[in-house]
C-alpha cells in the first residue's frame, strides 16, 4: 500500500483503548510526563505541530497521545504522521491500528478534512537525533510542508513543545557526515547517524538503540494559529514557518529555564 492511498479506517478504536493504559503507565510512571494546555486544541481538524526528541525511541508521541485521550476521550481520532520505515512488514498493521499514517501530504489532508486532529513532526529524525547540547533548539531542517498542509485542509496549527527527550541518552553529534558516507539518505531516508552514549550498549552509532533513561518529559501546548487570519489569504510559507518556530522556540526556552537538572527535570 502506498503512502498516497493509506486507509484512514485502519485506525481501530478498540485497539487504541487497549494500548492507551500501557502508554499511560510508561508516560506517567517512567517518564513522569507533564502536559499543559491540551484543552487549547480546538474541535474538529487541527494540525498539531511538535518538535521531536528522543532518538530512535522517541516517546513524545505516546506522551501527547495519552494527554490528548485524557482531555478529549479515546473516541476522538488522533492521527500521527510518521516515517515510512515503521510501516514495513507487520508495522503497517500494528501502527495503522493506533492511528499512524505515512507522512505524506495526501494522508495528512485527508485526516484533517475528516475532522481529526493530526500530529506532525516537521523536524523528523533530523531533530530527534540532534546533539543533546541542542536539546532546547527547534530545528525543522528547513521543512515547511506542514504550512501547505494546514492551508489546503483549512485547519489551524497548534504548536506543541516538549523538553527532556534528548536527555534519554547522551547524543554526542548529529552524524550527518557519517550518514552521507553510508548513503543512509538513499537506503533509510535519513540524514543522520549520530554517536550516542547510553544503556546498555554504551557508545553506539545510530544502532543498536539504547534503552531510554527515565528523563522527565514536560510538554506545553500553545495557542492555535489561524494562518489566514494572521497572514491573509496568500501567506508566504517561509514567513508563517518563521513565526511558528519563533513561538515554539520561546516556549521551549521557558521550559529549559525551568528545568533544574538533566533527566530529573
Image (tube, rainbow, N blue to C red):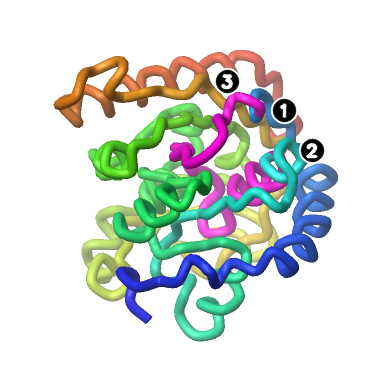
Q: Earlier in the sequence, mark 1 or mark 2?
A: 2
- The alpha-carbon separation of the residues under discs 2 and 3 comes to 16 Å
Asked whether 169 falls inside the magenta stretch, the response is no
The residue at 39%/69% (across/down) is 84
Would you identify the image quadrant in which residue 210 lies?
A: bottom right
**Vertical comparison of 188 with 51: above or below:** below
Q: Which residue is identified by label 2? A: 32
Q: Nearer the viewer, residue 160 or 200?
A: 160
| Any part of residue 161 in sight | yes
The residue at 29%/61% (across/down) is 178
Would you identify the image quadrant in which residue 243 lies?
A: top left
- The alpha-carbon separation of the residues under discs 3 and 1 comes to 9 Å
Q: Residues within 10 Å of mark 3 (few under 14, many from 20)?
A: some
x and y percentages locating residue 33 in the rendered image: 74, 37
Asked whether 65 falls inside the magenta stretch, the response is yes
Q: Is residue 96 left or right of residue 107?
A: right
x and y percentages locating residue 3 in the rendered image: 34, 70
Span of residues in magenta: 39-67
Q: Secondary structure at mark 2?
A: loop
Q: Which residue is identified by label 1? A: 265
Where, quadrant-wise, is the N terminus in this rendering? bottom left
x and y percentages locating residue 125 in the rendered image: 40, 53
Q: Residues within 10 Å of mark 2 (few under 14, many from 20)?
A: some
Where, quadrant-wise, is the C terminus in this rendering? top right
Q: Earlier in the sequence, mark 2 or mark 3?
A: 2
Amino acid at each position: 500500500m502506498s503512502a498516497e492511498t493509506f486507509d484512514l479506517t485502519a485506525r481501530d478504536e478498540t485497539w487504541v483503548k487497549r494500548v492507551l493504559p500501557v502508554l499511560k503507565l510508561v508516560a506517567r510512571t517512567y517518564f513522569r510526563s507533564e502536559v499543559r494546555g491540551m484543552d487549547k486544541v480546538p474541535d474538529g481538524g487541527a494540525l498539531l505541530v511538535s518538535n521531536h526528541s528522543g532518538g530512535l525511541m522517541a516517546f513524545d508521541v505516546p506522551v501527547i497521545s495519552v494527554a490528548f485521550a485524557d482531555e478529549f476521550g479515546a473516541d476522538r481520532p488522533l492521527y500521527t504522521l510518521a516515517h515510512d520505515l515503521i510501516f514495513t512488514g507487520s508495522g503497517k498493521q500494528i501502527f495503522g491500528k493506533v492511528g499512524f499514517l505515512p507522512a505524506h501530504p495526501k494522508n495528512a489532508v485527508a485526516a484533517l478534512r475528516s475532522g481529526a486532529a493530526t500530529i506532525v513532526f516537521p523536524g523528523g529524525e533530523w531533530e530527534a537525533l540532534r546533539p543533546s547540547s541542542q536539546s532546547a533548539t527547534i530545528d525543522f531542517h528547513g521543512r515547511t510542508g506542514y504550512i501547505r498542509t494546514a492551508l489546503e485542509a483549512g485547519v489551524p496549527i497548534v504548536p506543541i513543545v516538549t523538553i527532556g527527550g534528548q536527555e534519554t541518552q547522551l547524543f554526542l553529534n548529529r552524524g550527518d557526515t557519517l550518514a552521507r558516507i553510508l548513503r543512509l539518505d538513499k537506503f533509510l531516508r535519513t540524514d543522520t547517524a549520530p554517536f550516542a552514549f547510553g544503556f546498555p550498549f554504551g557508545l553506539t552509532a545510530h544502532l543498536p538503540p539504547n534503552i531510554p533513561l527515565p528523563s522527565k518529559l514536560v510538554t506545553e501546548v500553545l495557542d492555535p494559529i489561524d494562518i489566514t487570519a494572521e497572514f491573509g489569504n496568500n501567506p508566504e510559507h517561509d514567513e508563517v514557518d518563521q513565526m511558528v518556530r519563533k513561538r515554539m522556540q520561546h516556549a521551549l526556552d521557558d521550559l529549559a529555564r525551568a528545568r533544574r537538572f538533566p533527566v530529573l527535570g
